[in-house]
């Protein structure tokens, strides 16, 4: 059966807080004492049901990464970042292992162009009752210009991206390599925010997949979405020369981590 669009519940979205464009806004993730429907907790990392469940036929959950409102993978210590990713993978796996959903997705928004509404660092883990996300993507979306490869991880820049222009893929064989994946995200996100485009990039997404016996993290710098994609689903990609330059920049930073 072909996938159908997810149904957005406008009423459920009423009152949803926002503090990315309005930093003075209320942050429910800082107000830990009033959090409800907590599913798991490790130190200041908290997994809970999303209070604003705006998508029908889904189970929407949120994973608060840290008590630091302005934190994130680019600012955490290596040790803290690893703990965040280990906890996130554990919660994601728990939802997948329940066999209650056709698909379980995990992703992270950061910045005003990412589609997020709250600055406080968090992941979202969503069980989709009737939607097979792997109808929409293939392994071709994770292959391309090589950045680096060893026995822990493989990193590429997509030459057949889902949306474009630059999509950075980190592949690991299993959960034993989660720390290696987390370390790569730590370095790459810092590069994107501070050096890529002269430090002008403000937003990115992380998307996670379990595909063909591997785990993938796709890092996508975000800008205004191209009308080619909005109107025609046409992805765009940087030319080979530019992809090679970006691959070299990332490789050098990984070597120096």
Image: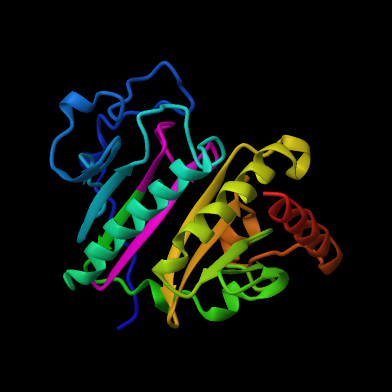
Image x and y of residue 42, in percent: 26, 43
Give residue 148's quadrant in the image.
bottom right
Residue 107 on the magenta span: yes
Is residue 115 visible in this depiction of the protein?
A: no
**The residue stretch that appears in magenta:** 101-123
Q: Residue furthest top?
A: 24
**Position of residue 3 in the picture relative to residue 71 (left or right):** left
Q: Residue 159's spot in the image, x, y percent?
A: 69, 72
Give the total of numbered labels: 0
- Magenta span includes 230: no
Residue farthest to the left?
Answer: 37
Residue at the image point whose x is 56% and y is 40% from the top: 74
Q: Position of residue 245 (x, y in %)?
A: 83, 59
Residue in front for this viewpoint, 193 or 254: 254
Q: How is the image coloured?
A: rainbow
Q: Quadrant of the N terminus?
A: bottom left
- Does residue 8 appear in the picture of this structure? yes
At 25% from the left and 73% from the top, the residue drawn is 102
Residue 243, horizontal then vertical, whole percent:
78, 63
Along the line of sight, which residue is nearer the eye, 40 or 144? Answer: 40
Q: Nearer the viewer, residue 67 or 195?
A: 67
- Camera-side residue of 221 and 150: 150
Residue at figure coordinates x 27%, y 56% from the top left: 91
Q: Residue at x 24, y 48 (%)?
A: 9
């Amino acid at each position: 059966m072909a996938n159908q669009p997810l149904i957005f519940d406008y009423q459920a979205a009423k009152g949803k807080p926002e503090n990315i464009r309005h930093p003075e806004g209320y942050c429910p993730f800082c107000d830990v004492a009033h959090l409800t429907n907590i599913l798991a907790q490790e130190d200041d990392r908290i997994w809970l049901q999303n209070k604003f469940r705006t998508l029908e036929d889904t189970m929407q959950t949120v994973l608060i990464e840290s008590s630091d409102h302005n934190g994130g993978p680019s600012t955490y210590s290596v040790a803290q970042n690893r703990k965040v990713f280990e906890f996130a993978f554990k919660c994601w796996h728990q939802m997948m292992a329940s066999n209650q959903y056709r698909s379980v997705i995990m992703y992270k928004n950061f910045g005003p162009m990412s589609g997020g509404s709250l600055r406080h660092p968090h992941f979202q883990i969503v069980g989709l009752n009737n939607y097979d996300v792997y109808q929409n993507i293939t392994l071709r979306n994770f292959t391309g210009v090589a950045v680096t490869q060893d026995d822990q991880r493989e990193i590429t820049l997509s030459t057949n991206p889902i949306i474009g222009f630059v999509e950075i893929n980190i592949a690991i064989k299993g959960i034993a390599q989660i720390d290696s994946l987390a370390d790569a995200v730590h370095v790459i996100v810092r590069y994107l925010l501070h050096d890529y485009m002269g430090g002008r990039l403000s937003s990115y997404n992380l998307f996670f997949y379990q595909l063909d016996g591997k785990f993938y993290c796709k890092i996508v710098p975000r800008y205004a979405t191209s009308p080619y994609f909005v109107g025609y689903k046409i992805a765009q990609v940087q030319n080979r020369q530019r992809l090679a330059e970006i691959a070299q920049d990332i490789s050098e930073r990984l070597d120096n981590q």
